[in-house]
Amino acid sequence: MLFNSPKGEQRQARFGEEQLSPSDDTRWLGIKLDSKLTYTKHIETIKSRADMTLARINKISRKYFGTSMTDTRTLIKAILYTRILFGSILWLTTSALSKIKPIFEKTYNKAERMVMGSLKSTPIIFLKRDSKLKSILATHIVRAHNMILQLATKEETHPAKTTVLRELHKEASSYPSSIHKLISWEKIANNTSLGPELINPFPTKPWRKILSIRNMGATKEEAEKRVKKLVRNRNAQETLIFTDGSDIPDKGKGSAAVAAPSGLTITRHITNTTQRPIWKQN
């Protein structure tokens, strides 16, 4: 994925034998990113996440015959605020503020009523006065400032310190920022020209061959024929692992197969993340 300005040029990147087009969006550490860095898709998930979290906190309160105002307030700060503000220093930009602010205010009002145990007809002014619950946006500002101060006081060799100090001592710049300027097509081309990296997660013994990984680059029908041929001609001392690339964690689907040294072919097929994997032995 390449972050680019709205007028940026979309190019394909070469990775081994494949030509890859930049993705429109991706998920990174639980945050949904899009190529224009508007965070629209991530903001859409905040409301549902907040409603679900409030419902669970309310269930906890009822289960234990009602919790005190202090306990409820602590639960909201520790669970609700932490969940909806996860990574907010990255995605809560000035442009995203207008979209997220109404969601924050509505969620904050619901949280205040839960703390006070008030009815919907209770005026908001009384809730703000008596709930002693800091607003979501104010909490974000405090946490963001704390993180910036921590980074600004790191040792000189820390990679983030230079960037933070540069941003603090200059006027607001237009897109892209100094971080985004570090990403260029030339650097991407230099990295992708090296080809796919061989992944060897464990130290191998000198007399053993390392794990060989190869992208077949074929259609499904051709791949099935090649896999059958590989299994027939496989060395009895080798373990052959292959997949059709359909592992989609978000949708709970995936498949893979292993040809073990014993000569047995074991196939794993997962249809739903809530179900146990089904193993078939052929």
Image (cartoon, rainbow, N blue to C red):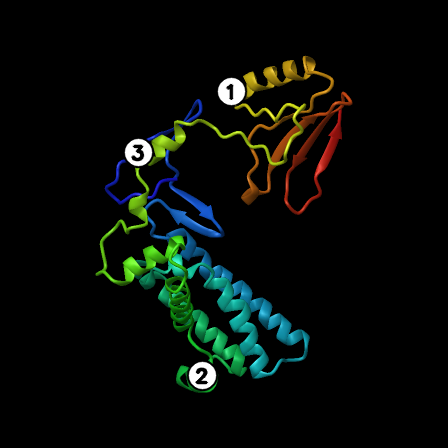
Instruction: Give whichever of discs 1 and 3 has the lower sequence position.
Output: 3
The residue sitting at 55% across, 65% down in the picture is 53
Q: From the image, state whether disc 3 or disc 2 is nearer to you.
A: 3
Marks 3 & 2, CB-CB < 8 Å contact: no
Q: Which labelled disc corresponds to residue 219? A: 1
Q: Position of residue 229 (x, y in %)?
A: 64, 13
The residue identified by callout 3 is 186
Instruction: Give whichever of discs 3 and 2 has the lower sequence position.
Output: 2
Q: CA distance from mark 3 to mark 2?
A: 55 Å
Q: Quick one: which residue is furthest to the right in this view?
A: 262
Q: Position of residue 113 (x, y in %)?
A: 50, 79
Q: From the image, state whether disc 1 or disc 3 is nearer to you.
A: 3
Q: CA distance from mark 1 to mark 2?
A: 62 Å
Q: Is residue 266 above or below residue 128?
A: above
Q: Position of residue 142 (x, y in %)?
A: 40, 71
Q: Amino acid at mark 1?
A: Thr
**Label 3 Cα crowd, 10 Å radius (few <14 / some 14-19 / many 20+):** few
The residue sitting at 52% across, 24% down in the picture is 215
Q: Quadrant of residue 96?
A: bottom left
The residue identified by callout 2 is 127
| Nearer-the-camera pick, 160 or 271 | 160
| Nearer-the-camera pick, 184 or 9 | 184
Q: Amino acid at mark 2?
A: Leu
